[in-house]
Amino acid sequence: MDADVPRIQGILTANPTVMGSLRRVLPARAVTKLIYVICIWTCLCFVVFKLSYSKGPVISLSAHVNRGLLQKTSGEILTTVAPEGAPTLGIPQKFLDLNPQIDSSPSLSEKEFLSSLADRSNLPLAYWTKSKNRPVGNKTCAPFPSLYELEFNNIYWQTLRTSNGTFYLYGAYYDDRWRAGGVPIVRILGMVDKIKPLATTCQLWFDGMKKAIFSPATYTYAWYSKWGNYKDDILQPFIISCKVPKKESGGKVPASVSLVERRCNKPTTNLRVTNNRPKNKDNFAVCVKGLDFLHEDLSVRLVEWIELLNILGATKVFLYELEIHPNISKVLHYYKKRGLVDLTPLTLPGNQPNIPGFRHFYLKSKLTHKRQNELIPYNDCLYRNLYSYKYVVLLDTDEIIMPVKHRTWEELMNEVVAAALKEKNYTRASYNVRNVYFLDDLQDGDELTHVAHEQGIPRYFHMLQHVYRSKNFTKPGAYVKCFHNTERVVSLHNHFPLNCLGTCTTFSINTSLAQLQHYRKDCVGSLKKSCKTDFRIHTIRDTIIWRYKDELVKRTANVLTKLGFFS
């Protein structure tokens, strides 16, 4: 550094103008001191500069800014690696010793992934089995479609585009009920954007048969024109039926079915044919339309409802999921593990929205579209359980069919069926129960509001707390719910069967035997004008449900405790 001082002095003295100016302003000794200070400062800067490049980069804000600019302009990511032994800039040792836990499990192979879909997909098993007897079709007429040649829509639907209309197919089912005429039928559940779809053909695929068997399709319209939306370009619910030729099939059940416009077309659909055949047939299953409770937490009420259904005799509750609150999901998956609930995810077909929240408001604003879409889960539930249950019961989560004289549905139906046969000696397609409102707040004759705080019953029990109902039932045949006979019905609506094997006969269960207890905040929209005069003013106290109080409280509280609702 001392050697550099004379050099710097020389630089300054070499410029007579600078030196002359300094001498005029400052004394000679002060000028000399200033020169020395400048020399020392310059040497210090030089040393720092040398050290920074000999021992590693200097970390500074400007360095990060410059690196960011370089990355943006060059497109290359520049990284800085600290050399071994470099300082850690004060990072605590505990952070240096941490080892994050990440998922290092291997990815599923294509075969493993497809196998995982076996129990939750409408795809045929042929796509994940290596059987030599799997179908292959004919190269020139009806080739068997590969998995990636199928056209999917909104996850759970398959699409057929024709010269006059588009089909969205949800599921296929085997129906060999003797009332159908002794010829087995494959039923396809779907939505079509035409009131009168064009003629199509079913390609029936069998295990052990290389080529398809052809069958013309027929259509059952699962809607009434007077209900609205009866026009083209709006998706309409249909049950598409294809007879299975006994001679050609050899009495076998088809493994899958493709729907095509012309029999030799290469299909874009291939639905597994559902044919559930348990050893024993239970009495009652409950079917629930797509749940749409994204922000509404009905979890506690749902536990009370499911437990009461089970006490009454429902073996299983089949629910479909559009969007649900996390607490509802926790409850339903708990019951699914116990075998009391079957939960199936669901979407809307076609160009309808499926964004959570957006879909909710879409269905709320387009009520007729909503009702048409609901027919898909209702009828899927029916056909999945044709041979598993004697009756399917379509309920909302705020409804209970309550026996008045009997303790269980089985005891009730034993008396009802006997009474129906005594009246007319034939089996009915359905047995309907009249609706009565248990509204959140009701008024008696003294205009007093009934507040839900029944002594001795926990406040979180909605049904057990609400024991005042309207004196009047809704009109016979209006807003009823039914026990549907699985041997007779072909298509179901929320309130009654639409199509049956033979006539859709129904038997009205007397209100002295059963009532549909409907727990709502208010009457349904079409009854709001007459709600006060017909249902709110005249009320009675009805504690029939307390017959199950002790068991229901115990079972519900145990489940809520297990699921952590009280912690």
Image: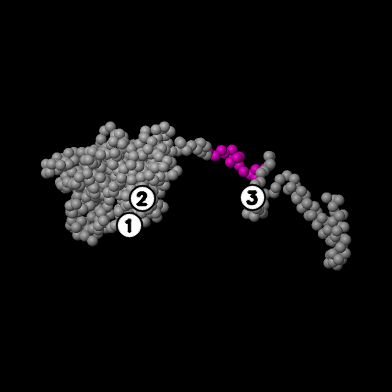
How many labels were placed on the picture? 3
Q: Residue 248, located in which quarter of the rendered image?
A: top left
Mark 2 or 3, nearer chain start: 3
Residue linked to disc 2? 167
Q: Residue at horizontal 82%, vertical 59%?
A: 34
Main SS, magenta residues: loop
Q: Position of residue 332 (x, y in %)?
A: 35, 42
**Disc 1 to disc 2, how far (Cα)?**
13 Å
Magenta span covers which residues?
87-101
Q: Residue at horizontal 18%, vertical 38%?
A: 411
Mark 1 or 2, nearer chain start: 2
**Disc 3 to disc 1, how far (Cα)?**
55 Å
- Viewer can see residue 455: no
Mark 3–mark 1 contact, CB under 8 Å?
no
Mark 3 or 1, nearer chain start: 3
Q: Nearer the viewer, mark 2 or mark 3?
A: 2
Residue linked to disc 3? 76
